[in-house]
Image (cartoon, grey):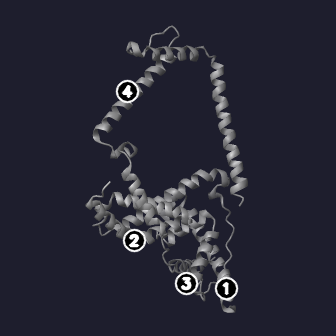
Amino acid sequence: VARQPTDYVRGEDFASFMRAYQDMVFTTATRIAGDARQAEDIAQEVFLKAYENFAHLSVSPTAGGWLKAVTRNLTLNHVQRYRRRWRFFSEFRREDQDSDEPEIEFALPDDLVADVNADVSRQLVDEALRSLPEHQRLPLVLYHFEEMPYEDIAQQLGISLAKVKTDIFRARAALAKRLLRSGVTAADTLSAS
Amino acid sequence: MTSEHQDNLERLVDRALRAQPALQAPRSLEARVFAEIERRAAQPWWHKSFSSWPIAARLAFLVASVGFAKLGLDVAIWLVSPFETTTSPFDLPPEMSWVQTVIAALAITFRSLPHTWLYGAIVLLAIAYATLFGIGATVYRTVHAAR
């Protein structure tokens, strides 16, 4: 079938549009989903929706915000659908029943990932985030990367405000400890080589 | 843990996370999106979402749906009505009389089944469902969640 000129122009424009935003969309999806393969599927879905609305988006000054919001919503839907499906199987204990054991205060440096280059720093942060339990990682990512307030996170995830705050706080502590430990190791390895 | 310590922790974690650069989308993403756009464009209208159907097709579908719902209700009422009622709930042309014969045969079979058989079948289905669900949960917890 011969391609219509308008389709061709639209396709070229859409390719440029996609190239401008695909890293942002993929990054958002990967951070929330915690999995690059799922993130690619979600990013594809986001751009298919964008294509359906391209007449409006191509001239909209808020196209980036639209894409960000759609990506976040689709990824959260995806994550929660998966979570609901498997919660019965993997989490017999209710999340609200976490123990209230007191946190031990530990010394904080000026920077959690000092003395390592950007690539190593990214790798360390990725590994540290992946090491967190899902019920801590997700609210942490929504708070720090997506800048969502505690109340919105609680509403979105269907858990109490207190639970969100506790999970984020514990996630920060676990992340900091892990980064401090692995950062020292990485710095030692780099300085030795 | 003191409030000051918590604030410092939040600040440090925030700085560490926000310092992370954006990830690079896979090269395959653009090709995947355009392939899917082409695939969807090549689909006939009846494979697309209902909102993309022509108006006439949408109306016809709605009318047919209402017709089928009415037919289903008529058949259900006829099946549970007293045994003496042997007349069909709908009038079909003579060349379609075999449909009435088949439905009448099914109705007689259904009505002649003891109720305990029906209840037994329902219980059996429920047990089979619960068993499969339990096996699925056990396999998931032992094989996947344990990793």
State the residue position of label 2.
Answer: A19
Tell if the residue under mark 4 belongs to the same chain as the one under mark 1.
Answer: no
* Dot in front, 3 or 1: 3
In contact (CB < 8 Å): disc 4 and disc 3: no
Which numbered disc covers residue B67? 4
- From this viewpoint, is residue A91 visible? no
Question: Where does the image place residue B49, in percent across and percent down from the top left?
Answer: 38, 46
Q: Secondary structure at mark 2?
A: helix
Q: Say which residue label 1 marks.
A: A184
Does label 3 or label 1 sit earlier along the sequence?
A: 3
Among the 4 quarters of the image, the one containing residue A179? bottom right
Disc 4 residue type (three-letter): Gly
Residue at x 39% of width, y 52% of height: B40
Q: According to the image, label 3 marks what residue?
A: A118
What is the chain identity of the residue bearing mark 3? Answer: A
Q: Disc 2 or disc 4, which is closer to the eye?
A: 2
Question: Which of the two discs, 4 and 1, sits closer to the camera?
Answer: 4
Q: Does residue A34 appear left or right of residue B73 in this picture?
A: right
Q: CA distance from mark 2 to mark 4?
A: 49 Å
